[in-house]
Amino acid sequence: MKKKDNFPAFVKRDAIVSGKEYMQLLSSLKQRYRKSQIKAAVKVNTAMLEFYWEMGRDISALYEQATYGSAFFDCLSLDLKAEFPGQAGFSTTNIKYAKRWYEFYNQNDINRHRAGDDLEMPIEFGQVPWKHHVYIFTHSKSVDEALFYIKKTIENGWSRSELEAEIDDDLYSKQGRAITNFDEKLPTPYSGLAKAILKSPYDFSFVDRRIKSEKDLENELERNITRFLLELGQGFAYVGRQMELKMPGGQTFIPDMIFYNYKIKAFVVLELKVKPFIPEYAGKINFYVSAVDELLKQEDDNPTIGLLICKSKDNTVVEWSFRGMTQPLGVASYKLNETMEEHLAKMLPTEEELKRIIETYDEETENDQL
């Protein structure tokens, strides 16, 4: 009796088929299929976003010609749901977001490639999910800020929760706020890449506020190294702490922490200070950067950079301190969680304000008695 192809049967795996060549083929096919899935997802997402973009454009144009109340969006939502039952994305809220999304970018004229009089949706928008877009434009103060978060989302593959955390932490304002001499000490475009990995202030809210010394701060950061690496940003790998540097003459030096950033392919020497920046700090980290360049840096690594994180900094003092320094250096500040006393101190009036209040009260009392 002949075995038919549509009958149940066991498939015997031959040992020869499971060889090296077969496994390479299987691995290649898996990778290609995953890539095709990603391409398909991006294509579907792009098509959906283009629909929202054009819907927002058409509604915006209609609003310029006539006045509609809030019932317009409710009515449009009901009609679209009736025509496409079971399809998501036609809620009143979503339709309003589509209009606001288009107008947010249209009013600022970010894309000058036009089809007629219509503003086209930027191609890269298709790589970012709709809910990401909604959170970005509703929480950004400018188009530049929104585009910054779109670019970072694409580069880092942020989930929505990761994106929300970065926006809530105001990464846009912090990025590039560190004072550096990278433009003078590093070639382009490496100088720009190096500046992009630094920010200020760094959020050390996960650190115990009872720290009194640099060693206490180092201990807390190392104990929370995962949180610390997330705060430093993408690309940082922890190399070591308190790596003793012994010199031929018997002198010993110990840099606080050393990292490697694979995005810029360079070592980063980190020094921590629980006090405001003073010029002497620049000379010390300049020496450590030179040492790492000599002893750890490989031929294919970019120049080592130094990052000094202090309790606070005066930008002029930092800039003057960099004069004469040979190595690329950056200085940033950090912040901790406020204590209850500090929070109350901000809310309560100062001594001068209290004095003015008392004087005003006395004057009003005197006038009432007259």
Image (spheres, rainbow, N blue to C red):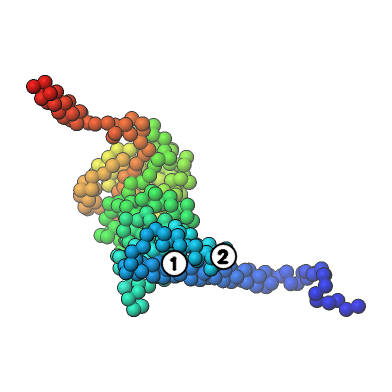
151 and 94: which is toward the camera: 94
Relative vertical location of residue 172 with respect to residue 121 in this rendering, above or below:
above
Q: Crowding near pointer 2: few (<14 within 10 Å), some, many (20+)?
A: few
Locate residue 258, reporting x and y percent.
41, 48
Residue shown at the point (40%, 54%) measured from the top left: 267
Disc sitting over residue 52 in the figure? 1
Residue 306 visible in the current orientation: no
165 and 119: which is toward the camera: 119
Locate residue 8, reporting x and y percent.
82, 70
Locate residue 63, reporting x and y percent.
34, 66
Q: Which residue is mark 2?
A: 85
Residue 325 visible in the current orientation: yes
Considering every residue shown, the one lying at the far top of the view is 369
Considering every residue shown, the one lying at the far right of the view is 1
Q: Using residue 166 as the reference point, say whether residue 200 is left or right of it.
A: left
Residue shown at the point (32%, 76%) measured from the top left: 117
Q: At label 1, which amino acid type do we have?
A: Tyr
Q: Kindly indicate whether the residue at mark 1 contacts the one at mark 2 (C-beta within 8 angstroms).
A: no
105 and 12: which is toward the camera: 105
Q: At label 2, which amino acid type do we have?
A: Pro
